[in-house]
Image (cartoon, rainbow, N blue to C red):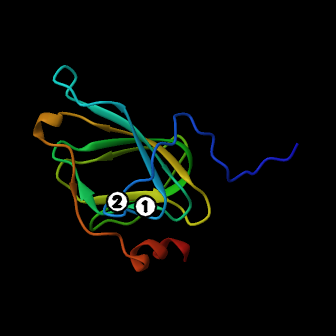
Amino acid sequence: MKTDKNKLAEIFPKGEKGSSETFTGNAYPTALVEADSVYNTIVGNVYFEPGARSNWHSHPAGQILIITDGVGYHQIEGKKIEIIKKGSIVKCPPNVRHWHGASADVGLQQLYIVPNIEKGIVNWDEPVTDAQYLINDK
C-alpha cells in the first residue's frame, strides 16, 4: 500500500478553519485545554495546510510550540527564519512578535501552550507577506 509522505498524521481533531483575520491559507486551530483560573494556561493544536501561516503576533507571557508532524517555519521578528519539523520545540518569548506556519510543500501540525493567561493571551498583528514567507524557498 502506497502512502503520501506529505500527509500528516492527525493526532487531534482538525477543527474549524481559522479566520483570515489571523491566518493566511488554510489553518485549523482547535482548543484542547480551555482557559480557566486553576491552570492559567491554554493548550491547543493547529493544523496548517501547505503554505498556511499565522499573522505576526505576540503573547504577553510567551508561547511554547511542540511540532507533532510536518515541516514548517518559525520567525521571531528581526531574526532569521527557522525550519521546524516533527519533534521541534520552540519557545516564543513574552511580548516578542513572531509567526509560524507550514512549508510550501508540506503541512505542519503543532501543539501550542500559552501560560500565565492572566497576563493576556495573544495580540494579533498584520499578515506575513508572501515576500517574507517565500524567502524560505530560495
Where residue 86 sits, quadrant-wise, is top right
Q: Position of residue 137 (x, y in %)?
A: 55, 74
As helix, strand or loop, the secondary structure at mark 2 comes to strand
* Residue that sits furthest to the front in the current view: 16
Mark 2 and mark 1 in contact (Cβ < 8 Å)? yes
Q: Which mark is residue 53?
A: 1
Vertical order, 45 against 77 (above or below): above
Tell me the kind of residue under disc 1.
Arg
* Residue that sits furthest to the bottom in the current view: 131
Q: Position of residue 42 (x, y in %)?
A: 28, 33
Where residue 129 sits, quadrant-wise, is bottom left
**Looking at the image, which residue is at 32% across and 65% down?**
79
Relative to 31, is 136 on the left or the right? right
Q: Judge depth for marks 1 and 2 and give the one in front.
A: 1
The residue tagged 2 is 99
Tell me the kind of residue under disc 2.
Trp
Where residue 117 sits, quadrant-wise, is top left
Q: Residues within 10 Å of mark 1 (few under 14, many from 20)?
A: many
Picture quarter with the N terminus: top right
